[in-house]
Amino acid sequence: MIETNENGGQKGHLHPVTQVLREVVDSFVAMGFEVADGPEVESEHYNFDALNVPKDHPARDMQDTFWVKDVPQTVLRTHTSSVQIRYMEAHEAPFKIIVPGKVFRYEATDATHETQFYQIEGLVVGPDITLAHLKHTLYEFYKRLYGNDVKIRMRPSYFPFVEPGVEIDISCMKCGGSGCNVCKQTGFIEVMGAGMVHPNVLRSANIDPRKFKGFAFGGGIDRMVMLKYGIDDIRLVYSGDLRLVNQF
């Protein structure tokens, strides 16, 4: 049933991406994280160089990045990780931050990919940080988002800005981990990348990696919306079709 206002008109309400974004931010704030922000039009230094992304990395190519015409070494940020460097340069460790925001990728759209989407980035830096802290933090977050029955696992992976790097999987929302078409019979769904902050990244922000360690993670808010509400095509989220939006 669609709610109406006192004049009989349809009441407005928040988009599902906004709703989940606020829920995600509230969860991390409750765990002691500070919210940080940064520019969407970013320099190549903050988007790639300071994050230990090699000069010949394919992510820098036009196939993955929107480069700003006639403005040298300037891009639409491909991830919110660039804010990590800006924050580390301006603050002394230890700290815990999350960075919600819009990012841009130059790629073909399909059921699971869009040229612009929302991402949440997390960064924790302190003297004795380990992978165990990362796993506990994400487990607590996903319990808040999807319920106490959720399971989490880590798989080895590679990202230039972390070492070691891991993929984070959670138990499938549809089958509860028993295996179905959504999780391709594995019982788990990949939800984000994470790992221990690479020493080169800490050095680029003038933090001594001999004194401080850190973990970082990043995942798509749109992906969380799809999993939470069973939406099977990300393009529906941005279509403006009120038949979808009015369900929330």
Image (cartoon, rainbow, N blue to C red):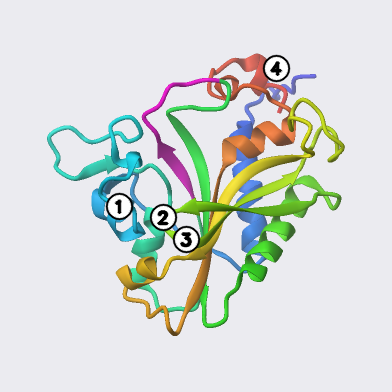
How far separated are the C-alphas under marks 1 and 3? 13 Å
The numbered mark, 2 or 4, whose residue comes first in the sequence reads 4
Using the image as rendered, state which of residue 173 and residue 132 is in the foreground. 132
Q: Which residue is mark 3?
A: 162
The numbered mark, 4 or 3, whose residue comes first in the sequence reads 4
Residue 54, numbered label: 1
The numbered mark, 1 or 3, whose residue comes first in the sequence reads 1
Q: Secondary structure at mark 3?
A: strand
Q: Amino acid at mark 4?
A: Gly
Q: Is residue 77 left or right of residue 196?
A: left
- Whether 71 is drawn above or below 98: the answer is above
Do residues under tags 1 and 2 come within 8 Å of each other at their CB atoms?
yes
Q: Which residue is mark 4?
A: 8
Q: Secondary structure at mark 1?
A: loop
How far separated are the C-alphas under marks 1 and 4? 58 Å
- Residue 36, x across and y down, in percent: 45, 59
